[in-house]
Amino acid sequence: MGEKRAQFFERIAILVIAISFVVWSAAFIYGSSFVGIDGKRYFSLFDDAMISMRYAWNFSHGLGLVWNPGEFVEGYTNLMMTLIMSFSTLIFDKSTAALSIQILGVGLMLGSAYLSMRIADYVIQDEIPQHRSLIRILCFFCVLSYYPLAYWSLMGMETGLLALLLLFSIFYTLKYVKEQTLSKLILTAVGLGLAFLTRNDSAIFAVLIFSFALSETYKSKPARVITGYVLGAACLYGLFVIGQAVFQWVYYGDLLPNTYVLKLTGMPLLSRIRDGVGFVTPFLIETAVVLVTVVADLIFNFNRTKFFLASFVFAAIAYQVWVGGDPWNYWRIMSPAMPAVFVLFVQAVRHHSYSIWHSHLQRLYPSEPCLPKTMGNSSPRYFAHPHRVNNNQ
């Protein structure tokens, strides 16, 4: 299979997977709707997402970004998602607005799957075209088939938007490391800033990204230039953080949302950590195969880019433990980091499965001088079709 045929097959496979996901999403959205006592079908979002929708409805109808008119309490933690919802509530009625957010979730999932493919290109640069196409297809499929991420996205939570913005920031960070152009770093900072507005706790990901950008480019140009680039991008990101803090103080009279007070105050740290460990344990069991494979590949084939991509899920796990878990066991906090993990998992499985196959063939055909490191343009006669006896002598 030549490079053009591999690209053609990749496009067809991606199209089929994307269409299949859209059809499944339509069935999911329909299944989450209900018929009211008036005989009309209504669409609804997840509990927390409906809280944001109420804030968005009041905001778009001139009552302010509040739960009840005249009561300035910040009962949401997803400002960016709430503002997006306000556009829907401005145009549509309540049920249709909820449906539009669910449809948006489909687009967010497809966007995340696409960005995971683009990120994979930076991990599999040495692969031949056929293998690159296969890995990209599998990455696209894995992201769309990860139910927790799809569930939160289609039910209107900010998880899908955060995943997309995180992948966007990772992608442009990798482009910056390769090209070292300031524009890529600015796009990274903007993506992270929007991610912060989506969920403030995404700041832990910003620390990882800026640290990686600095460490990977520090020696390639004068230190003052590289440091200036990263510090400038960090300052741009800081404008989003400071801007929201000023807004919260001026508008609500507080720097922290009400949910922070309810969830993190009045509980001893050790009790929180104990609950957090108990919460993430089922997640670790469910994803054990994926995480163990990724960690093993890091140990035996260490690469700083792969370590960078793996760090997000472990940072999310640590954060989830620190806050004491979550009310729902669909891994809302860890889900945005899973697409990067799937990229590493698919690459590791392909690499090690080929290594096993390579070793097996060497045992079967010890007289062959060597087997190719990658099965590409060179084709040993025992790979030829059909497999006749004289091909294997």
Image (cartoon, rainbow, N blue to C red):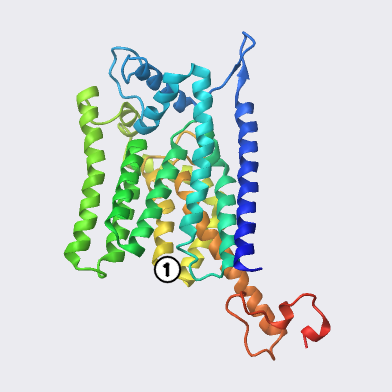
Picture coordinates of residue 19, whole percent (x, y):
63, 42
Picture coordinates of residue 38, whole percent (x, y):
62, 8
Q: Quadrant of residue 376?
A: bottom right
Q: Quadrant of residue 393?
A: bottom right
Q: Determine whether 256 is above or below 382 in the image.
A: above
Q: Residue at x 50, y 60 (%)?
A: 344
Left or right of residue 180: residue 11: right
Count of numbered marks: 1
Q: Residue at x 35, y 24 (%)?
A: 75
Left or right of residue 295: residue 83: left
Picture coordinates of residue 256, whole percent (x, y):
27, 31
Q: Residue furthest top?
A: 38
Q: Determine whether 69 is above or below 389 in the image.
A: above
Q: Report the quarter where the N terminus lies.
A: bottom right
Question: Secondary structure under badge 1?
Answer: loop
Picture coordinates of residue 193, whole percent (x, y):
31, 42
Q: Can the viewer see residue 329?
A: no
Q: Residue at x 19, y 58 (%)?
A: 228
Hey, what amino acid is under mark 1?
Asn
Q: Nearer the viewer, residue 1 or 151?
A: 1
Q: Residue furthest left?
A: 224
Q: Residue furthest right?
A: 389
Q: Residue at x 32, y 12 (%)?
A: 69
Q: Where is mark 1, residue-wise?
A: 303
Q: Determine whether 370 is above or below 303 in the image.
A: below
Q: Nearer the viewer, residue 335 or 369?
A: 369
Q: Alpha-carbon neighbours of circle 1 within 10 Å: few (<14), some, or many (≥20)? A: few
Q: Can the viewer see residue 387?
A: yes
Q: Nearer the viewer, residue 179 or 29?
A: 179
